[in-house]
Image (cartoon, helix red, strand yellow):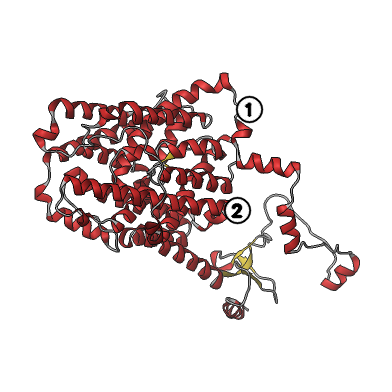
Amino acid sequence: MVEPVGNHYVVARPVYSENLFNEEHEKLHRYHKTFWDHLKLYFRCSPQRVKKIALGLFPIISWLPAYRFREWILSDIVSGINTGLVAVLQGLAFALLVNVPPGYGLYAAFFPVLVYFIFGTSRHISVGPFPVLSLMVGGAVVRLVPDDSAGNGTSTNISAINEERVMVAASVTFLSGVFQLILGILQFGFIVIYLSQSLVSGFTTAAAIHVVVSQLKFMLQLPVPGFNKPFGIIYTLESVFSQITKTNIADLVTSLVVLLIVFVVKEMNDRYKAKLPTPIPIELIVTVLAALMSYFVNFEEKFNVAVVGKLEEGFQAPVAPDVSVLQKCIGDSISIAIVGFAVAFSVAKVYSIKHDYPVDGNQELIAFGLGNIVGGSFKGFASSTALSRSGVQESTGGKTQIAGIISAVIVLIVILAIGFLLAPLQKSVLASLALGNLKGMLMQFKEVGILWRKDKYDCVIWVVTFLAAVFLGLDIGIATAVAFQLLTVVIRSQIPSCTVLANVGRSNIYRNRKDYTDIYEPEGVKIFRCSSPIFFANIEFFREKLITAV
């Protein structure tokens, strides 16, 4: 007989039936609240409840009076300046994904930050444009205002089509904000649990592929129309390769050089982040140099490159959403609302755990909902949080959303005063900067092997989500992914793992008898384990497995 290693545990207790146990031990009869009890409790009004609601709805009331000015202000200023510079460039770059003039990306990088400063609960995320959401908004824009509606391509028609696209993007953003606000008020912050990490990873990786393909027309300066339909990515690639001989060599060379520089410097930032006081602001450096070269060499005239052109100066009056657009983009807005919240809340949770403070999912929904409503009213597009930008805000010493306000001030300066300096910047540079921020999402391909070894269901969810989002489009892809994920939940519960346990080496440790050779099973006793609750859908499966085991 093999003696078990370590301490010996001897359990001795009387044998009970359910009736005998209840006779010896009196059971408490608890009062279970009715629906009306819960309703009365929810709508009760007392000074304490009013205070709690106010503090919950306006988190700034809690953290701003406790702000350690002398300790934190310098760090927040430095972080805000760095984050603001990145936000300006990403706003311009991600506007290309939305198919609107670059200047409108600055509005998306400004207004949501102001709203989040008041209503948000995370101290470290940077609110503003996110490539996945920008691409999803862009899909709705292209579907409702296709390229061929520009007619003969005159400047008048192009201006009109751009204005129409701006209104579509703003309306989609407004409606997605309304959905987020409603979900937040109804306390639906828990919906993020239905988007598993493997689903979000597969979806964002697919979105990164879409971003790469969508930016080829700017990097090569080809007249590629938008295809927002199933297999649209195939049609886009076909259009690109059919016109590849028309590539603008100057834009191609610029794109490759910028990509190489950005990737190399970002790799240096990652490798030597412990030694660098602050990450090298390579996007800013590249943008300044590219704009100067384009201006002094006159790239637009000499090489016929596409440039940013004149940006909108100042702010336009707020506008109401286009009702006709709202009726056609309900599905897009729901997808944008849920994906934007899921990504932002995931990042917020990472930083809240790292820095030991709570974040409230319901309040985050309200904050992002109001941010998108305000942003859409001022012709911005959907906002969430970009992982790279939030990383800059946190790694450069940001302590609170004061850093976010400082970053908004930087964006404001560009909008009001120095935006004209970016007019000669090539669009191919912005496209390359957009791709330069995709490294983290593209590296998620590595997760497939890890998931396969860890949980094959999660691995299949990742692959199905990725393929559906790539080939069917992001809107249909996310719906397909959620449906498939729920199907796997049904399969897991309907076909649970059932095993017979045996004593391994008479150690009183019981494991699956198929995994060991030196097993001992007491005569006349079978220990049967089922990994799922037993209910009507799996009762027959459970019965068959149990009979087979016995």
Measuring from the top left, give residue 300's x and y in whole percent: 14, 34
Question: Quick one: quadrant of the C terminus?
Answer: bottom right
Residue at x 56%, y 64% (from the top left corner): 516
Q: Amino acid at mark 1?
A: Ala
Q: Amino acid at mark 2?
A: Gln
Which type of secondary structure does the marked residue at label 1 adopt? loop
Q: How many marks?
A: 2
- For residue 187, the mark is 2
Residue at x 85%, y 73% (from the top left corner): 19
Image position of 503 with respect to 367: above or below = below
**Where does label 1 land, which residue?**
66
Q: Work out which residue is located at the far top of the displayed protein and give it.
A: 70
Residue at x 23%, y 32% (from the top left corner): 423
Crowding at mark 2 (Cα within 10 Å: few <14, some 14-19, many 20+): some
Measuring from the top left, give residue 184's x and y in whole percent: 56, 51
Measuring from the top left, give residue 362's x and y in whole percent: 58, 49
Question: Quick one: quadrant of the N terminus?
Answer: bottom right
Can residue 211 be spotted in the picture? no
Residue at x 15%, y 38% (from the top left corner): 305
The alpha-carbon separation of the residues under discs 2 and 1 comes to 27 Å
Image position of 396 with respect to 318: above or below = above
Mark 2 or 1, nearer chain start: 1
417 relative to 81 in the view: left or right: left
